[in-house]
Image (cartoon, rainbow, N blue to C red):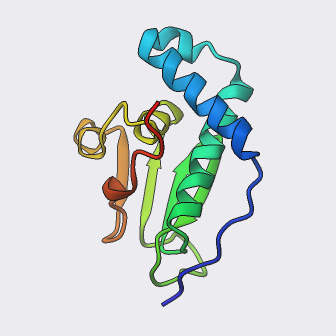
Amino acid sequence: MSTGAVPKRRVPVAEGHAALRTWARTHREDPAAAAALPRSARATAVRFALEELATRTPGNSVEVRVPPFGVAQCIPGPRHTRGTPPNVVETDAVTWLSLATGLTGWEEALASGSVRASGVRADLGEHLPLIRP
């Protein structure tokens, strides 16, 4: 069983926290305004949240996909090396940022169909939210 290495950060922590908090604050006040934030700000928030999850729960058994912005591997367990991994979580940017900031709960997102999770390790509920704005 591999625990995986802590990923290298591409988004500076201060910049990532600021982008994530700005998105959460804006989304709470006016979801349409959050959708109108510059694409670069949304991308930074998504990528930072993916990096934060992978840093807190390093591993290679779950792949979290937030197209078109990013992907991260996390959660200790068996490593996959070829093809589609057995444990995959995929969602859109708004749902991912809502989960990362606690504006939406894991079970709520699953029930609404805005998160697709497959595999026995693909439950991120105990690892979210990443911040509480």
- In the image, residue 34 sits, relative to residue 54, either above or below, namely above
* Residue 65 falls left or right of residue 68: left
Q: Residue at x 71, y 39 (%)?
A: 14
User: 82 and 76: which one is in front?
Assistant: 76
Percent across and percent down for residue 127 are 39, 56
Front residue of this view, candidates 59 and 55: 55
Q: Who's the residue at 64% across and 40% down the image?
A: 68
Q: In the picture, residue 58 is in which quadrant?
A: bottom right
How many numbered marks are there?
A: 0
* Residue 130, position as x, y percentages in the image: 47, 46
Going 44% across and 10% down the picture, which residue do you hit? Answer: 29
Image coordinates for residue 50, horizontal then vertical, percent: 58, 51
Where in the figure is residue 27, as x and y percent of width and height?
A: 47, 18
Drawn side of residue 76 relative to residue 69, left or right: left
Q: Nearer the viewer, residue 23 or 113?
A: 23
Which quarter of the figure has residue 59? bottom right
Instruction: Give the vertical position of 67 relative to 60 (above or below).
Output: above
Q: Is residue 44 left or right of residue 27?
A: right
Which residue is situated farthest in the bottom direction here?
1
Placement of 33 over or under 131, stated as above or below: above
Q: For the point 26% across and 35% down, which residue is it?
A: 112
